Image (tube, coloured by chain):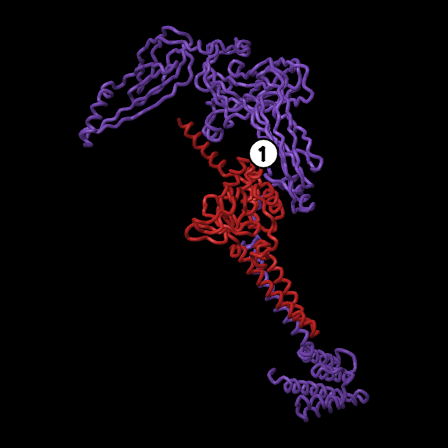
Amino acid sequence: MRKSILLIIIMSCFSLISQAITPTEAKQLYDQKNYTGAVAAYEQLLKDSTLTAAQQAPLYYNYASCQYRLHNYALAVWGYQSALRINPSDADAAFNLQLTQSKLQDQFDEPSEIFFFSWTRALIRHFSATSWGITAITLLFLMLIFVTGFKLLSSIPMRKVCFASSIALFIVSICCFIFAYAEANHSFAERQAVIMQPTKVYDAPTASAKPLRELHEGVLVDITEVQSNGWKQLLLPDGSSCWSNNDASLKDLRN
Amino acid sequence: MLRKILIVLAVLLLPLQAWSQRFSASIEDVGGYYRLSFTINASGVSGFTPPSLSAFEILSGPSSYSSSNYQMINGKTSHSESTTYTYVLSARKSGHVTIGPASISVNGRTIRSNSISVNVQGGSSQGGNASSHQSNRQASASQQASNGVQQAGSPVTQRDLFIDVTPSRTRVKEQEAVLLTYRIHSRVGVGLSNTSLVQKPDFKGLISQEIPLPGNQIQTNLEHRGNATYRTGTILQYVVFPQKSGNIVIPSITFNCAVVQQDNTMDLADLFFNGGGTMSVQVNRTVPQITLHVDPLPSPRPANFSGAVGKFSISGKMLNPTVKTNDVATYRITLSGLGNLKLITAPSINFPKDFDTYDAKTNDNTKVSTNGLHGELTFDYTFVPRNVGDYTIPSVSFVYFDTATNSYQTLHTQPIHLHVAKGERSNADVDKQLALLKSDIRPLHETETGSIFAWGETGFWILVALWFIAVFAVWYFTNAWNLSRADIVGRKQRNAGKQTMKRLRAAQGILSGKASGDFHAAVINALYGFIADTFNIGQADLNTESIQAKLSERGIDAALTDRLLKLIETCQYAQYAPGSSQDKQATFDEAVSVINSLTHELHPSKK
């Protein structure tokens, strides 16, 4: 009797340990082509609220790759875009997203020009918060070299150049800090979502609106406006706008 | 209310109390098995000795169960305890069996139970026909009391544990699926904990596909064989497809089995760390080889026979509803059914000459099951129409051997008519899309532990703090550098007194005879050195006029200037007309006095 109680205690200890899945185990599942298991593992890993954004990015990427293997292209788009929002310079995620999108039913032409968001916003979104932050610090240290030059050089024109450079570098660096902060807090991030099931979209946010087209799973849209009656304005990848009131078919990007 | 319930309980429990210290045996039939229990209504029992149970096979037991009752009746508390020993038995033979009394000692006194007779139904008839070569071969294997889990050190015989293989059929057609089922049989009491294949079998002349066990677990059932009870479960299943006709040998394979045995010699620490007084014994079990008789497919084979054997259906469709020039279009053929799906290659299609065609991509959505492979294969044919026009994708025929009708069958897809409209895409666009279609996603990313220099992390703020430290350092050191460079003169002036003292001491040394040299020259050297350092002029530029000019510039008293000049003059003169030692002493004192006065006048703060 005592033995069996002991056994139960020992076994429950083991089961507790085995519940915490590690990224290595998740990758092993993927390597063993157990994509369903790997998806579940990555979902569980992503639930960890102590993760920093930089740690989440590869998990989103790997999660998306598993979903791609399972032909769940909508969820793959969702995962790759989540990773890209954290680390916009991730070339692998960008490529895989493009590849996934090429498999979707709805194909969109690129918008002829980027008219819907300002160039600053595009610039900020192009690098991760960490990239901006490290750039800012590097510039600050560079600035110190010019400050030293300004203080030590005797030639007046050289000192003028050093002074002007220091001031310029300082201003640029402060801008980088602001960008990093903005990027980290998603101040400029569009609210985005992925269509999860076929959805009819309309030309106006009213019940009498004319249906424009049907969107299929995997389309990545920006949510540009949300009305109190539940209608959402969606910006499609080709730069056109439409309205939808089918909330269930949209899976918002978390970050 | 509560009291009433208590009274009712007490009345119900009263008989128990009355039978105090009674040791009773009972047996009941539970679906082919028998539960034998011995109950003693006493506390402090020990030394339970069961009767001989040779007519039965003990499936489990004895397991003991103790219970205590506390009763409170009108404020009086009474206590009773009972212990029950239970066996689960299976009868070896049908018939009338008498179970003798068991004995137990209660507080040192031995009590015997009643003996009971029962008509039992032997269980051997259930599995008696399921004969197995292993169990017969080892008929003389040691017959051990399978009392609970085996004791450590007892041998695990072929009779206790064996594995066999059953093919779903032994006579098949070429390419027809055969299911091989490997089942393990372990006698009740053999604590089988794990089995693993020693080596993956090498199926020659067969294509094999393993069927995963449901839930990756071995499900066991009880089964009677001879006069023993076994737990039986499927441990491995393969679907194999013979690739040639004739006799094909399924090779013998070996499993490694871990058997858990009870070890009563372990101490408490071992019990804890090794999992409760058990030890694991490794034994190997070999499954003998079997032979399949494979018949060839009937001749003559059709010329375009695809090699598929089973039951199939085929369909073809365009994935793009409309096609324009320079569009990447996909034509998909779906082949679904049951059979050797894995071996089927994409049928060839004669696309119109104007199309650029690419290799078909096969998607395998098949599942392996006990009937073979079922599901569907899709073949995606990618092509790019280059010119506007009307085209037809011809019908595709697929010839297979139908195992149900035992004949060759031909399937056709519907031909598809296409109208290719003018598209806007350039050749470069198409090439880009084709490249994308052919490529696969990039490999998984390593999950990072997170850079400590990431935005918002400690490392990042340390870098910022480092910068602030660097700012202060740069500020401080550049200032200090500039200061020291600007003050070379000041440094000379500060050192002037010290240098002069050194020179005067040299002069004093000559005066007192401790050193040799020209006393007057030393004094002049001291005076000139002092003036040169203090007023930052070269010794070469020193003359009466320049000294006078510098001193008056600094507002030095004219009398003091005169004294200095006179002293210099005296010394210069004395160099060539040596005087007495008293004169020398006076000259030295005068030099010290003049330098002191000058120092006082130049640095009034320094006393």
Residue B320: x, y in percent? 60, 38
| Residue B18 or residue B292, whichever sits in front | B292
Where is B121 relative to B494, above or below?
A: above
Residue tagged 1: A33
Where is A61 relative to B358, above or below?
A: below
Q: Is residue B4 left or right of residue A13?
A: left
| Residue B27 or residue B450, whichever sits in front | B450
| Residue B306 or residue B213, whichever sits in front | B306
Name the quadrant containing residue B126: top left
Residue B47: x, y in percent? 36, 18
Name the quadrant containing residue B390: top right
One can see residue B532 in this view = yes
Where is B546 relative to B385, above or below?
A: below
Residue B573: x, y in percent? 79, 90
Q: Is residue B575 left or right of residue B100?
A: right
Residue type (three-letter) at the residue carrying disc 1: Lys
Q: Is residue B508 left or right of residue B447?
A: right
Label 1 crowd bin: few (<14), some (14–19), many (20+), radius 10 Å: some
- Extreme front residue here? B390
Q: Secondary structure at mark 1?
A: loop
Q: Mark 1 falls within which chain?
A: A
Q: Is residue B45 left or right of residue B319?
A: left
Q: In this structure image, what is the colour of chain A?
A: red
- Extreme right residue here? B576
Which chain corresponds to the colour purple? B
